[in-house]
Image (spheres, helix red, strand yellow):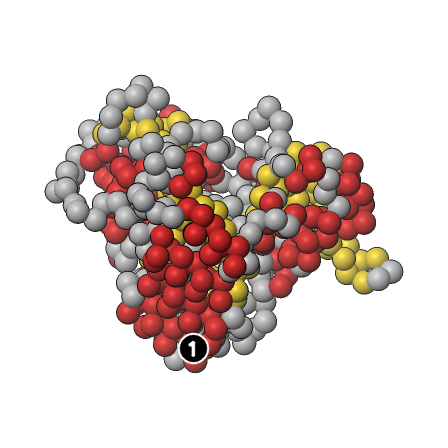
């Protein structure tokens, strides 16, 4: 099989190590069943050196696949209903939702799955200039609606089944918060609106550029003129499978398995799948913080489930398990990586006091900022490589949240010892 650029549409990227590839597994709202998780764990054990990587968009990645593994792995994933079309490349990516514990979670989940089904494998939206990200959130508190090409949030007016739509956000080298494109859009008009935005984006944006670059060229008002107007509403029949995630009676029914740096051993994933099957309706959720969340079904034995989590290595007692720390693969596997992010993150945690452990953290191994450091209370970006007496070494920028929508750099060009010294002060 000849590996071509179009394999990106199948969720496949070449790794930093030229003979190996990464397969991204696309999950709507980060939801995966116990059966699917067990299949992924089995594939990871056989082909991916026994580890899966959880992403900040609720997907799973299998690294260290060879060219000869790709077709077999894709077929095995498809056997359990995991299709990765559009997980990479110029397509509508996996639809995220960070609010599956909100009061209206079932409705949000149903919307995410509806959008995911419509655009996955839809050939009309597979030749976009670059990735196109859609997110649904219960409210604006997380700020994640600001980093999507389209962020959908229940309308501020409180009108049921209506959404405020935010557009053209993004991080990377040029972080730009999304702007409010439209208020009170009917739910049944959202897919036609997403289609119209994607078509305008495709028609007027150079290859390799995100939607935010088009807005910079033509302005928000002109963009509104091109995409708004009479929006068709496409109603769908009620479905019995709109919501798969159990809704816990209270916060005690939400269990979190903290996964440091998003690196989850296949045995741990298999253990979580068994806990989900026994106690949590057979459903696991990959969160934007690279953890795994499970919701107890009514009548579920919480103490038994918590004990099972601890036995599987998720007791939540160590500093690495207590801190929220998003970590991209960095130079361990990513072509763009400038720093070994997992090693740096581990060293950073060692220097944290109690106050620092209570903050949200993220580290990105390059300025593309896949770990979303600008959405953290404390963020780290490997911004460049510098030649010093020890050879080529990364320099780090330290970000802190403030009054603006995104955290901003407060110190730049730090060596690793300087970075660790600053962390120790927090």
Say if 177 sits above or below 20 in the image. above
Apparent side of residue 321 relative to residue 286 in the rendered image (left or right): right
Q: Left or right: 404 with respect to 418?
A: left
Q: Picture quarter containing residue 32?
A: bottom left
Q: Quadrant of the N terminus?
A: bottom left
In front here: 324 or 282? 282
x, y percent for residue 211: 42, 41
Tell me the residue at 84%/62% (across/down): 390
- The structure residue drawn at horizontal position 34% and vertical position 63%, both measured from the top left corner, is 36
- Quadrant location of the C terminus? top right
Give the residue drawn at x 47%, y 29%: 141
In this orientation, which residue lies closer to the viewer: 54 or 317?
317
Q: Secondary structure at mark 1?
A: helix
Residue 90: x %, y % from top left: 39, 54
Q: Which residue is disc 1 drawn over?
A: 69
Residue 393 at x, y = what percent?
76, 57
């Amino acid at each position: 099989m000849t590996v071509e650029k179009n394999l990106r549409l199948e969720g496949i990227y070449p790794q930093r190590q030229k003979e190996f590839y990464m397969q991204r597994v696309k999950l709507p709202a980060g939801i995966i069943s116990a059966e699917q998780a067990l299949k992924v764990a089995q594939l990871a054990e056989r082909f991916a050196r026994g580890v899966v990587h959880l992403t900040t968009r609720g997907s799973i990645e299998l690294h260290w696949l060879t060219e000869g593994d790709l077709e077999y792995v894709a077929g095995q994933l498809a056997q359990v209903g995991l299709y990765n079309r559009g997980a990479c490349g110029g397509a509508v990516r996996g639809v995220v939702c960070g609010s599956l514990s909100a009061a209206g979670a079932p409705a949000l989940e149903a919307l995410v799955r509806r959008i995911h089904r419509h655009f996955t494998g839809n050939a009309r939206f597979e030749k976009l200039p670059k990735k196109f990200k859609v997110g649904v959130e219960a409210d604006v508190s997380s700020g994640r609606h600001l980093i999507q090409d389209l962020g959908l949030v229940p309308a501020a007016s409180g009108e049921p089944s209506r959404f405020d739509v935010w557009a053209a956000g993004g991080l990377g080298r040029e972080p730009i918060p999304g702007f409010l494109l439209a208020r009170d859009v009917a739910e049944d008009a959202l897919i036609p609106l997403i289609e119209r935005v994607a078509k305008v984006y495709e028609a007027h944006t150079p290859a390799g550029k995100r939607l935010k670059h088009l807005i910079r060229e033509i302005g928000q008002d002109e963009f509104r003129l091109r995409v708004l107007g009479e929006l068709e509403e496409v109603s769908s029949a009620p479905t019995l499978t709109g919501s798969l995630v159990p809704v816990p009676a209270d916060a005690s029914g939400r269990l979190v398995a903290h996964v440091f740096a998003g690196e989850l051993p296949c045995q741990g994933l298999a253990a979580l799948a068994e806990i989900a099957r026994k106690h949590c309706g057979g459903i696991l959720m990959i969160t934007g913080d690279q953890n795994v969340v499970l919701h107890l079904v009514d009548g579920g034995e919480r103490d038994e489930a918590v004990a099972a989590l601890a036995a599987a290595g998720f007791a939540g007692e160590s500093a690495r398990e207590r801190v929220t720390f998003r970590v991209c693969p960095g130079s361990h596997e990513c072509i763009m990586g400038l720093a070994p992010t997992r090693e740096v993150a581990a060293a950073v945690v060692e220097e944290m006091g109690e106050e620092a452990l209570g903050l949200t953290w993220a580290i990105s191994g390059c300025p593309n900022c896949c770990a979303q450091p600008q959405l953290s209370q404390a963020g780290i970006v490997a911004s460049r490589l510098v030649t010093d007496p020890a050879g080529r070494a990364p320099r780090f920028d330290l970000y802190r949240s403030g009054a603006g929508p995104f955290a901003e750099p407060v110190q730049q060009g730090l060596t690793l010892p300087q970075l660790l010294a600053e962390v120790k002060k927090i």
